[in-house]
């Protein structure tokens, strides 16, 4: 009886624990937390900052402070730091309700290993969850954008996150075929950094590369492109600070390799799709979600390559988080703890 009462009073929480950003959805309130997946710690392990304030420290910390992203490729790379970060986000989502521990659904990349799943379950429980559930991120994204995943008809989702791109064909509440590659938004940033080193002997930081991606990045040429953007970094020859102007065309050229990998994953998923489901996709097309979906022209690129209709979701960044929140109401998430 007590557990039943607690279940009615405690919050049901969905978490999109991404490599770049973490979003938390609370049942009845919507998305209440949207922060970078970054945490800053001192040399003795004390947590100094989490989220946006920690992200501002990246590349700017003294020797005794470390600002890091504890997830790589969508899975936990540092268990203790991830647990501390997740605990902070859960407390921020339901402040003042520490006595009523929530049930939590967390998105996990499709194809994650049993060890990776167990680590995420344990981290979620240690962070303050009463019960932990997992749902594959492509399935959560499909739920979040309102695709008919429970029906006997194919839906296709391309989720371009920070550390991983996942391409999945879904029907009857499950994933039929999926490709998950560790090429995504972070690799696009790294490609820009590599281009600056290769073309101009200029070393730039992650934040600068991300700013250039947002301002000038594109996957397909378009009219009226921005003439250029000043980029600041350190000259590798002289060792002195230096500023140069890069154009949208240069940034697009720098992104060729990661974009080709994403396109290849989409093509391979389509090639492995059963004929009846492939026939559904001819008319229905595919849906783009994730932060990488905001790259200008990527929908046109995929449309040209596949010949299919490509739809960008209304808010690509929130699709997985909304889906994790809906998992309690719609299809059942796979229970992680008996």
Image: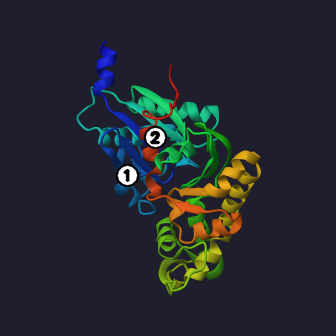
Task: Residue at 38%, 44% (x, y): give it.
Answer: 24
Q: Are marks 1 and 2 in contact (CB under 8 Å)?
A: no
The N terminus lies in which quarter of the figure? top left
285 shown above or below 27: below
x and y, in percent, of residue 296 in the image: 53, 71
Using the image as rendered, state which of residue 278 and residue 112 is in the foreground. Answer: 278
Residue that numbered label 2 is attached to? 324
Which mark identifies residue 147? none
**Dot in front, 1 or 2:** 2
Instruction: For label 1, count other residues whose C-alpha is less than 10 Å away and answer few (under 14), some (14-19) or many (20+).
Output: some
Using the image as rendered, state which of residue 28 and residue 39 is in the foreground. Answer: 28
Q: What is the secondary structure assignment of the residue under circle 2?
A: helix
First in sequence: mark 1 vs mark 2? 1
Q: CA distance from mark 1 to mark 2?
A: 14 Å
Report whether residue 306 is seen: yes
x and y, in percent, of residue 299 in the image: 58, 66
Q: Quadrant of residue 61?
A: bottom left
x and y, in percent, of residue 90 in the image: 35, 39
Left/right of residue 233 with respect to residue 10 in the rendered view: right
Using the image as rendered, state which of residue 175 and residue 17 is in the foreground. Answer: 175
Q: Report the residue that reaches farthest toward the top.
A: 1
Residue that numbered label 1 is attached to? 34
Q: What is the secondary structure assignment of the residue under circle 1?
A: strand
Report whether residue 77 is seen: no
């Amino acid at each position: 009886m007590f557990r039943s009462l607690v279940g009615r009073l405690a919050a049901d929480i969905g978490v999109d624990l991404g490599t770049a950003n973490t979003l938390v959805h609370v049942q009845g309130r919507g998305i209440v937390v949207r922060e970078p997946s970054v945490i800053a710690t001192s040399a003795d392990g004390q947590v100094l900052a989490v989220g946006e304030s920690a992200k501002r420290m990246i590349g700017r910390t003294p020797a005794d402070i470390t600002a890091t992203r504890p997830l790589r490729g969508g899975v936990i790379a540092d268990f203790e730091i991830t647990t501390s970060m997740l605990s902070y986000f859960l407390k921020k989502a339901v402040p003042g309700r520490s006595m009523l521990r929530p049930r939590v659904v967390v998105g996990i990349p499709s194809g994650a290993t049993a060890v990776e799943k167990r680590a995420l379950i344990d981290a979620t429980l240690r962070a303050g969850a009463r019960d932990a559930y997992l749902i594959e991120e492509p399935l959560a994204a499909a739920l979040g954008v309102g695709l008919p995943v429970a029906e006997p008809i194919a839906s296709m989702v391309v989720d371009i996150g920070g550390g991983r791109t996942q391409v999945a064909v879904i029907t009857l509440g499950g994933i039929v075929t999926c490709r998950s590659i560790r090429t995504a938004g972070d690799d696009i940033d790294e490609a820009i950094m590599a281009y600056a080193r290769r073309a101009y002997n200029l070393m730039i930081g992650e934040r600068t590369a991300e700013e250039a991606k947002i301002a000038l990045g594109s996957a397909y040429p378009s009219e009226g492109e921005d003439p250029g953007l000043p980029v600041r970094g350190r000259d590798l020859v002289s060792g002195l600070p230096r500023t140069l102007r890069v154009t949208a065309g240069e940034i697009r050229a720098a992104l060729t390799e990661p974009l080709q990998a994403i396109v290849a994953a989409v093509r391979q998923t389509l090639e492995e799709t059963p004929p009846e489901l492939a026939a559904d996709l001819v008319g229905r097309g595919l849906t783009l979600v994730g932060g990488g979906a905001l790259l200008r022209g990527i929908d046109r690129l995929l449309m040209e390559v596949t010949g299919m209709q490509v739809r960008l979701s209304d808010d690509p960044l929130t699709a997985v988080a909304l889906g994790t929140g809906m998992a309690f109401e719609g299809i059942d998430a796979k229970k992680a703890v008996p």
